[in-house]
Image: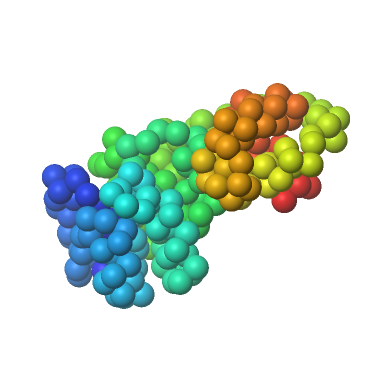
Amino acid sequence: MIFDFVEDDTNFAGRMHEILNPMAEEIRIFESAESYLASKTQSLAEILFVDIVLPGLSGIELTKIIREKHPDLKIVVLSAMDSDEILFQALKSGAIGYVLKSDLEKLPSLTAEIIAGGAVITSTLALRVLKSFHEPQTNAKDGFESLTTREKDILTELISGQSVREVAIELDLSLHTVQTHTKNIYKKLQVNNRIQLIRRASDLGFD
């Protein structure tokens, strides 16, 4: 069994290698998304662990590329970024797990679960996600209907996992314009973060 890591922090990569070495026949470490893509051996791996912040392409961008090229490869984000928005970007991009680097001691058990066919989010994040989904529903239908055509365009991009900056590029708008529209969308749909936004859009049948 081969595990691939895309991680530019050599000290952290060494710790991951030590922790998972008993479970793997081979562990390969790449310092950038570009070097990983250049290897052209992605299909040999069982699991790809990828950091978010990398030189060049980000872990989110790499996840999108690999998901399209190798849909059966299990991709897990291993990051220090404790962010609802980044979590959902990762999952929407095709990752089947999101593990905080602060939960590294749980990596062997989580890896075993992934190998068995599961998907994982460490408890630190899972509790917050569940809390968001269990919050009382409010009637946002009127808010949805009040969205402008441009706001609906931006909402489509946001729930697909795009960052605000990526939306600005995609729709050829200024970053400030997209930020303003995004604030209006959140206000009209009565949400506070990306998790709630995706849930509300799903409840309204918007995709």
Relative to 25, 59 lies left or right: right
* Residue drawn at x 43%, y 54% as measured from the top left: 61
Image: 19 above or below 196: below
* Residue drawn at x 25%, y 42% as measured from the top left: 105
What is the count of numbered marks? 0
* Residue drawn at x 79%, y 36% as measured from the top left: 148
Quadrant of image for the N terminus: bottom left
Nearest the eye: 108 or 200 = 200
Nearest the eye: 102 or 201 = 201
Image: 42 above or below 135: below
> Can residue 3 be seen from the camera position used here?
no
Relative to 200, 121 lies left or right: left
Residue 205 percent across, percent down from the top left: 78, 47
Residue 76 percent across, percent down from the top left: 39, 54
Residue 197 percent across, percent down from the top left: 65, 36
Residue 51 percent across, percent down from the top left: 32, 48
Q: Which colour scheme is used?
A: rainbow
User: Residue 45 falls in which quadrant of the image?
Assistant: bottom left
* Residue drawn at x 29%, y 75% as measured from the top left: 41
Relative to 180, 104 lies left or right: left
User: Residue 21 falls in which quadrant of the image?
Assistant: bottom left
